[in-house]
Amino acid sequence: MGGLARLTTGYANHAVLTPRDLVALYLHLTGAKHTTSPRGSYDKWRVVNRNSANLFRRREAAGYLQTCLECFLALAERAGEPWPGGLPALEQCLREYVRRALDAAATDTGADLLLLDQGVNAWRLPLSRLAPPSTFVVVHRDPRDQFVDARAALRQPGRVEPSAASFADTYQRRRRGAVRDAAKIAQAYGHRSVRVGFEDFVYDPASVHALVESLSLAGRPYRQGRFEVARARAAVGKHTRHLTREESETIAAALPEYLDERAGQRVRAGQDLVSGARSRHRAAPPRPRNTTGPGAAANPAGSG
């Protein structure tokens, strides 16, 4: 949906569908964006190109891609023109095409419910304005552990490695922003959200069962995902092995309300923690079964 969101931004700025914005959308869909960064350095468009190319190689994505390209053709017919009804009507049109694309993906895979991994990231919830009514699962995690992985990813050539202080600032802004955005999209677009702690998901079976029931997944057949229990457990508390004391204390001092006591312990792969340990997250949401509001991760096929 990122490509469609950029198109709507361009329309908001120019009041017409410019050829430049339409070409950018086409290159996004087909994985042909031009990149100028050196090989080996991070370039988000190179990542987009790779992901789009992978879709074109998958037979079960044929219906999804056909709908996406039909959407592009419908938009291209009005190149250089204002969209009838303006931006709200354009977004409604795009919402309908996204619904059709997801329905096509469900049909081609024989599913009546789609679970999309990071279709919309927690800090980009406003993008969900282009999605049909859905349920977003927002997974939060102890920021000290998250900093370890974020820093490793941002150490790639072409990216900027954050300090503990700058990471804490970004983390806080995104967490607070996600809460605000979740309430807005729930009211405006009928989305529902479920928030779950990564540590609860790994060590508290009751949380997992509640999440499964909340998403109406109980008893459904499913394709095996990439979740590895031992690897997930080893990730809880990993900051004790990878951060300096000063870095851990900097993040803890800035974000005390988001810390999880289980992540404060030194954890080895496969080592169990007491499942009854409680998260220190002060704004813990109610059990997912009754949570409504922000975000989405499951989209029922045929939703209107």
Image: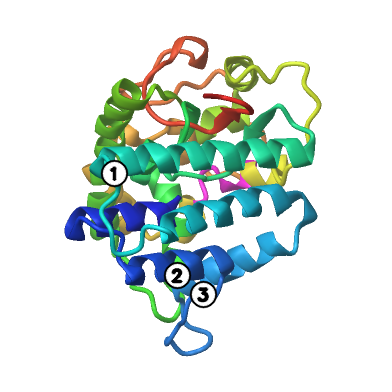
Would you identify the image quadrant in which residue 163 lies? Answer: bottom left
Residue 257 coordinates in the image, percent (x, y): 28, 31
Amino acid type of the residue that numbered disc 1 sits on in the rendered structure: Pro
Question: In this orientation, does residue 265 appear?
Answer: no
Amino acid type of the residue that numbered disc 2 sits on in the rendered structure: Lys
Q: Are marks 3 and 1 in contact (CB under 8 Å)?
A: no
Query: Looking at the image, which is closer to me, 160 or 265?
Result: 160
Residue 54 coordinates in the image, percent (x, y): 68, 64
Task: Give the extent of the magenta segment.
Answer: 233-238
Determine crowd level at label 2: few under 14, some 14-19, many 20+ residues with C-alpha closer than 10 A. few
Residue carrying label 3: 46
Q: Kindly identify the residue that appears in the image at 58 percent across and 21 percent down.
A: 211
Residue carrying label 1: 84
Q: Answer above or below: position of 94 versus 79.
A: above
Q: CA distance from mark 3 to mark 1?
A: 34 Å
Q: Which mark is residue 112?
A: none
Query: Looking at the image, which is closer to me, 212 or 49?
Result: 49
Query: Looking at the image, which is closer to me, 140 or 215?
Result: 215
Q: Kindly identify the residue that appears in the image at 29 percent across and 44 percent down.
A: 84
Q: Which mark is residue 44?
A: 2
Q: CA distance from mark 3 to mark 2?
A: 5 Å
Q: Answer above or below: position of 187 versus 202.
A: above
Left or right: 265 as drawn, with respect to 20: right
Q: Kindly identify the residue that appears in the image at 43 percent across and 61 percent down.
A: 76
* First along the sequence among labels 1 and 2: 2
Q: CA distance from mark 1 to mark 2?
A: 33 Å
Left or right: 253 as drawn, with respect to 76: left
* First along the sequence among labels 3 and 1: 3
Would you identify the image quadrant in which residue 280 lies? Answer: top left
